[in-house]
Amino acid sequence: MQHISVIGSGTMGNGIAHTFAQFGFDVALVDINPIALENALTAIGNNLDRQISKEILSEEDKQHTLGRITTYTDLRAGVRQADLVVEAATENEGVKLGLFKELDELCPSHTILASNTSSISITKIAAATRRADQVIGMHFMNPVPVMKLVEVIKGYATSEDVTNTIITLSEKLNKVPVAVNDYPGFVANRILMPMINEAIYTLYEGVADVEAIDTVMKLGMAHPMGPLQLADFIGLDICLSILRVLHEGFGNPKYAPCPLLVNMVAAGKLGKKSGQGFYRY
């Protein structure tokens, strides 16, 4: 496995491309927006510079990493050699199902199709293809070059060979893969999102203000970032989407998103990416 195609050049997509290229893989980074691709290469260069400043990489390593990344705006051209596709498009079920149907038609028969989804069913995504045994979840954490965890999600039909291949591949990226089964939220977000939602309810009900809630969790529970600040960094729209997947998937009211979160997203207060969420940026 040498040729990796990454679909989507946002924060997660460019981080995934960076990581694969850093560890010697040839990467096709695909996005319909050429400006987004330019921004992605700039972001990757800046992140490589941070690694150089920390003496993790050399300037030569940076040039080799960038040299392994080729950008494409045409999906067919970007996946024609792919041994593995990692989809990192928007967290929208309809978009992902349509994309995987198209990838199934365009990719070589041996290609493994992986999604970086943080909540959407891998089994449902796989059902949009004719290769359900070759579809898997590969959920990286942000920032991808730094965070060690890769949640490897096995769909109902995912083969053991494909699961083992992705686990081995993740280890080659100096990551720690953890295999989980395909249920709403998997493990990471099934635990994280209710905590974030409860922090929002704590604010909504007037128990404490934003900084107090985050300070309690940072100093009392040794979290590196408070849950409200973390929600801002994830994106409040993404948090809302994941909570709705959990609520619908389990039918349990404990996953119902806080009305404050719903209103903030409706008002366009999406966190860091919009300049304002629970904090101003």
Image (tube, helix red, strand yellow):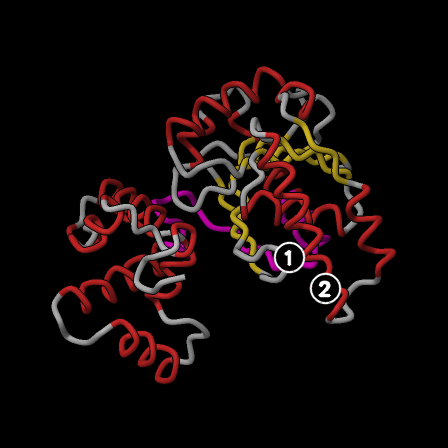
* Disc with the residue nearer the chain's start (2 vs 1): 2
Q: Amino acid at mark 1?
A: Pro
8 up-or-down from 63: above or below: above
Q: Quadrant of the C terminus?
A: bottom left
x and y, in percent, of residue 203 in the image: 19, 68
Q: Quadrant of the N terminus?
A: top right
Q: Amino acid at mark 2?
A: Gln
Q: Is residue 252 left or right of residue 29?
A: left
Say what secondary structure mark 1 lies in.
loop
173 falls in the magenta region:
yes
Nearer the observer: mark 2 or 1; the answer is 2
Query: Looking at the image, which residue is at 19% across and 50% down?
Result: 256
Contact between labelled residues 1 and 2, with CB atoms less than 8 Å apart: yes
x and y, in percent, of residue 129 in the image: 50, 21
Mark 1, residue position: 145
Q: What label does residue 51 carry, if any?
A: 2
Which is more toward the observer, 145 or 49? 49
Query: Looking at the image, which residue is at 70% across and 32% down?
Result: 71
Q: Residue furthest left?
A: 205
Query: Looking at the image, which residue is at 61% across and 49% down?
Result: 15
Residue extent of the magenta highlight: 166-189
Q: Is residue 170 left or right of residue 59?
A: left
User: Marks 2 and 1, Cα distance to the nearest angstrom?
Assistant: 9 Å
Which is more toward the observer, 267 or 188? 267
Q: Residues within 10 Å of mark 1 (few under 14, many from 20)?
A: many
